[in-house]
Amino acid sequence: MNNSPIRSNYLQVLEQIAQAALSARRPADHVKLVVVTKGHPVEAVQEAVEAGVSIFGENYAEEGSEKVITLREKPGLEWHMIGHIQSRKARLVSEYFDWVHSLDSLKLASRLNHFAVESGRVMPVLLECNVSGEESKFGWAAWQEHRWESLLEEFAQVAALPGLKVSGLMTMAPYLQDVEQARPYFRRLRCLRDYLAQQLPGVNWQELSMGISADFVVAVQEGATMVRIGTAILGARPHLR
Ligand SMILES: *Cc1c(COP(=O)(O)O)cnc(C)c1O
């Protein structure tokens, strides 16, 4: 392993989250840090565990589940799926992950629900929303406020599935030179959340998973309750498989 200063990076990011929360008059303990380990070997995850990290994010079902299995002995780790899930990987995800941030269709919801019910558990999920309109992004189309109403029926159907516990929303902002330009997208996700809380009040819309290494300070200022950070803590990713 290289000498990547995972521990000091981790502490520095925690401090930056606290500062960003303070600047927005939010309590820092309302922001959960998900450390994204995709593309990094299990040794890096182990080093992060030793540094005090307990919440990890992975993008690929196989890579993630291998790490879950390898680190089974470590108590108290939480694994969050944050990448697009192909239908045929739904079983793997439901078996090995504690959270799904990247729920992006009713079809995937019903697959995940099926496996969750089968194994007698309830999977907390976030609905991924595309608030930028970029075609490369997954998620429900949510960049036009006047179309938000058209989301309600599917979201209500997802929320009614007994094996899933809808807990909020997730998004990726566009990659922009100036992070300030990401602010309107985070704000839009927060407004969507407030709209859903009004329209579908029986559902828990509390969590907002938004913000990565490049833009998490702005995301926290705009109300993120979960940030997903890889590079700023683990360094550049070695090659993805
Ligand atoms: C890779 C990834 C991240 C982390 O990105 P960094 O720039 O390494 O912080 C966060 N969210 C998603 C969905 C990702 O795919």
Image (cartoon, grey):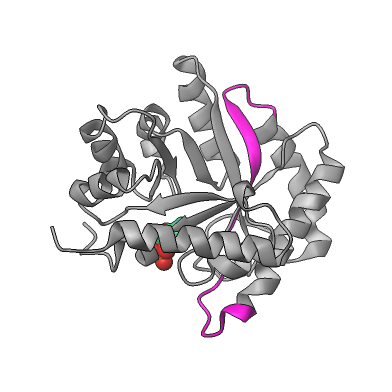
Extreme-right residue of the structure: 198
Q: Residue at x 73, y 57 (%)?
A: 190
Extreme-bottom residue of the structure: 177
Location of the C terminus by quadrant is bottom left
Position of 16 relative to 42 (above/below): below
Q: Residue 196 colored magenta?
A: no
In the rendered image, residue 104, in percent from the top left (x then y), is placed at: 56, 48
Q: Residue 165 colored magenta?
A: yes
In the rendered image, residue 68, in percent from the top left (x then y), is placed at: 29, 35
In the shown orientation, is residue 90 left or right of residue 108?
A: left
Extreme-left residue of the structure: 1
Position of 106 relative to 214 (above/below): above
- Residue 140 in view here: yes
In the rendered image, residue 25, in percent from the top left (x then y), is placed at: 74, 60
User: In which image quadrant can residue 107 be found?
Assistant: top right
The image quadrant in which ligand 1 is located: bottom left
- Residue 211 in view here: no
Q: Residue at x 36, y 45 (%)?
A: 52
Position of 28 relative to 114 (above/below): below
In the shown orientation, is residue 56 left or right of residue 4?
A: right
Location of the N terminus by quadrant is bottom left
In the rendered image, residue 220, in percent from the top left (x then y), is placed at: 62, 61
Magenta region:
160-180
> How many marks overall?
0
In the shown orientation, is residue 228 left or right of residue 40?
A: right
